[in-house]
Image: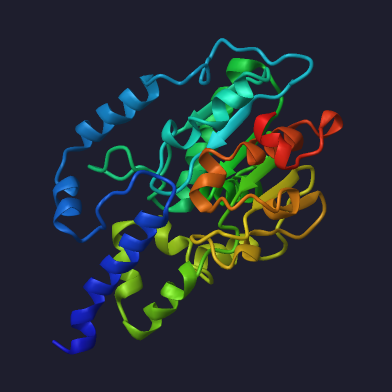
Amino acid sequence: MTLRKRLVRPLAAVLLSALVVLGPGTPVAAAGSASASSAASSSESAASAVSSSLSAAPDRGWNNWSCKPSAAHPRPVVLVHGTFANSVDNWLGLAPYLVNRGYCVYSLDYGQLPGVPFFHGLGPVARSAGQLDAFVDRVLAATGAPKADLVGHSQGGMMPRHYLKFLGGAAEVNALIGIAPSNRGTDLLGLTRLLRYFPGAEEAIGTTAPALTDQIAGSAFLTRLNAGGDTVPGVRYTVIATRYDQVVTPYRSQFLTGPGVRNVLLQDLCPLDFSEHVAVGTIDRIVFHEVAAALDPANARKTDCASVIG
């Protein structure tokens, strides 16, 4: 075995470790490590039980299936978590923020892998978009609303675009708000460029967690997604990015072009906000304020540094 081949698995583990440490969820051992191997040996029934327990976890008022949208907020809001996250931990800040402002708010788990509890958003992105499609159908049926608004963090801000473009989602969605979305993938501060020097490394990562290779800049999935334009007619798009993003890099790759697009750099709203990739989707109240403004632009108040107490 050549030295190059011997280095493929260690490099894959390093890249996975970096994604986990920098990603939006609680850190988990990199695939290929002893911990990941142990997790992979868990039964699918155990993972299903954990997923059920997450759905039943305290949600501070969201995922209330009896909620009916008001005249002031006529559309339900569906929150779409990021890679290595889940329907609860990604939204402990934003979900109650929106509920307290009168929205019907829902969140889903997607991209689950067999034997991997808690940490989702790892399956093929196209398949995850199908899960979102089914979840939005359920939300619309429960609320009676004709359309929903989507808010996603990281992968969760990009993946819905597949649903909108290829699965008929444009007929069911009014707006997509992406917080640090991986719209054109990431070079992970240049780390993914190392893959070209180790044939087989990308395939090794993709076999373990397909969503990771789907989000590498230039992937086949992203090439198809972005071909022919970023947007679909009838949907409003908002992208909120931070200059200090260390996961979806370069940060300007998050921005979209096309009709109905508004790209927002967080530091243009508040130069003193140094939030990075994780914080913008989980705890940053200036971002939360801008999300609320994007959901209801007709009644939006200006977002600035003072919005942290708004």
Estimate the x, y position of residue 135 in percent, counting from the top left. 52, 30
Q: Is residue 114 visible?
A: yes
Residue 115 occupies quadrant? top left
| Residue at the image point whose x is 78% and y is 31% from the top | 296
Q: Nearer the viewer, residue 173 or 11?
A: 11
Estimate the x, y position of residue 100 in percent, counting from the top left. 63, 18
Horizontal side of residue 285 vs 33, given as left or right: right
| Residue at the image point whose x is 48% and y is 70% from the top | 189
Quarter of the image with the C terminus in it: top right
Estimate the x, y position of residue 218 in percent, counting from the top left. 53, 72
Q: Nearer the viewer, residue 19 or 125?
A: 19
Estimate the x, y position of residue 5 in percent, counting from the top left. 21, 83
| Residue at the image point whose x is 75% and y is 54% from the top | 268
Q: Is residue 47 above or below residue 121?
A: above
Q: Residue furthest right?
A: 298
Horizontal side of residue 82 vs 15, given as left or right: right
Horizontal side of residue 48 vs 68, given as left or right: left
